[in-house]
Image (cartoon, rainbow, N blue to C red):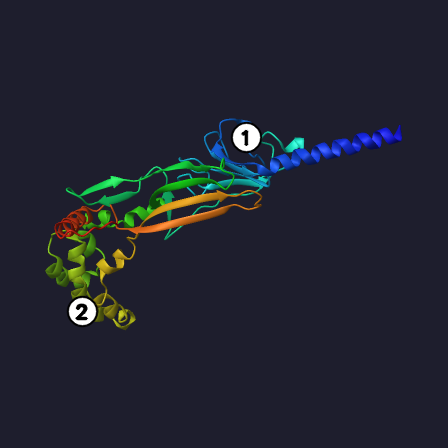
Amino acid sequence: MTRSRLLLATVLAAAAGLSACADDTLLRAKVVTRQDELIGGPSARGKLGDYLIENDRIRVVVGGPGPGWAAGVFGGTLLDIDLRRWQPEFAGGHGLDHFQEAFPLANLLVPNPADPTKALKLGDQVAVQDGEAAVRVLADGSDGREAVVRVEGHAAYMFDVLQFLNRGFLDSLTIPAATLKGLVPAAYQDIVDSLLGDKPLDLAGIQALLPQLAGLIPLLGEKYAGLAPLLDGLNLFALLNRLQFSFEFTTDYILRPGEPFLTMRTTVRLSPPRCSPRWRAAVRSRATRRARTGSRWSR
């Protein structure tokens, strides 16, 4: 009897081992279409429509496009990750995910999968063509080499308030003269009136006034003496241009057979701001000149 039980246990162990070996080749990336395909756990945020990447060692969920759970804002971020657990109690979306979120970040800009990348195409006519803007399965793992989910999109501000540093917004900004005059002590109102008049000031007007305002600083006393050289040498356009970097993001979430880790590979391409009318005019002018000379140019 004991010998029979021992033989049965040996057979079952061998069968389990063969079953595990059969799963060594597991590798896939797919859209989550069923609740039991999710990972689950205390920090799990995955939902239907997100993307599952898994092999025989780990399981990963990448969020689809749309509002994010945390700082990722626009979706396409790494949401959940856990070991592949063979115990029945952890199956069907009842895993132990404790991961919060990961995503690429550059200059407080994050990728927005709903906003297409742009490419300037030269030919008989100059045209700006939309690129990819999506979260998609780039490789489903069926070749046994790697499973990849790709996230592409133009950069967007991580915090809404940063949109007010956008050059297109600032180019159109005007400040009433009365607002500026209200910042100056009453004793100097006559001098300021002579400088400003009653016309509102745009960015260029403020820049032109800086040297003259620097000349007034000594009137305010020694306490403010250090402001004079600062104002006199300040270039508002150069300062704001430093804040106008715009990016195109491409992030690949890569999983290979047998690897207990996920590879996250991001390519960031620098591109000019696209919202400013001045930029659009400059692009058309530059592209036309290059097209006439027969040279090829892309961002």
* Closer-to-camera residue (182/282): 282
In the picture as drawn, the residue positioned furthest to the bottom comes out as 222
Q: Position of residue 88 (x, y in %)?
A: 66, 31
Q: Is residue 27 left or right of residue 1?
A: left
Is residue 96 something that shows in the picture? no
Q: Residues within 10 Å of mark 1 (few under 14, many from 20)?
A: many
Please tell me which residue is depicted at 62% across the width and 31% down the height of the picture: 91
Q: Is residue 240 left or right of residue 5?
A: left
Q: Quadrant of the N terminus?
A: top right
**Marks 1 and 2, the one that precedes in the sequence:** 1
Residue at the disc numbered 1: 37
Q: Secondary structure at mark 1?
A: helix
Total numbered labels placed on residues in the image: 2
* Closer-to-camera residue (277/170): 277
Judge depth for marks 1 and 2 and give the one in front. Answer: 1
Residue kind at label 2, given as amino acid type:
Gly
* Closer-to-camera residue (1/241): 1
Please tell me which residue is depicted at 18% across the width and 60% down the height of the picture: 207
Mark 1 to mark 2 CA distance (whole Å): 69 Å
- Tell me the number on the disc at residue 215: 2
Q: Position of residue 34 (x, y in %)?
A: 52, 26
Q: Position of residue 192 (x, y in %)?
A: 15, 61
Residue kind at label 1, given as amino acid type:
Glu
- Tell me the number on the disc at residue 172: none
Asked if the residue at tag 2 contacts the one at tag 1, i.e. Cβ–Cβ closer than 8 Å, the answer is no
Q: Secondary structure at mark 2?
A: helix
Please tell me which residue is depicted at 59% across the width and 29% down the height of the picture: 92
Q: Residues within 10 Å of mark 2 (few under 14, many from 20)?
A: few
Q: Position of residue 140 (x, y in %)?
A: 47, 35
Is residue 265 something that shows in the picture? yes
Please tell me which residue is depicted at 22% across the width and 58% down the height of the picture: 237
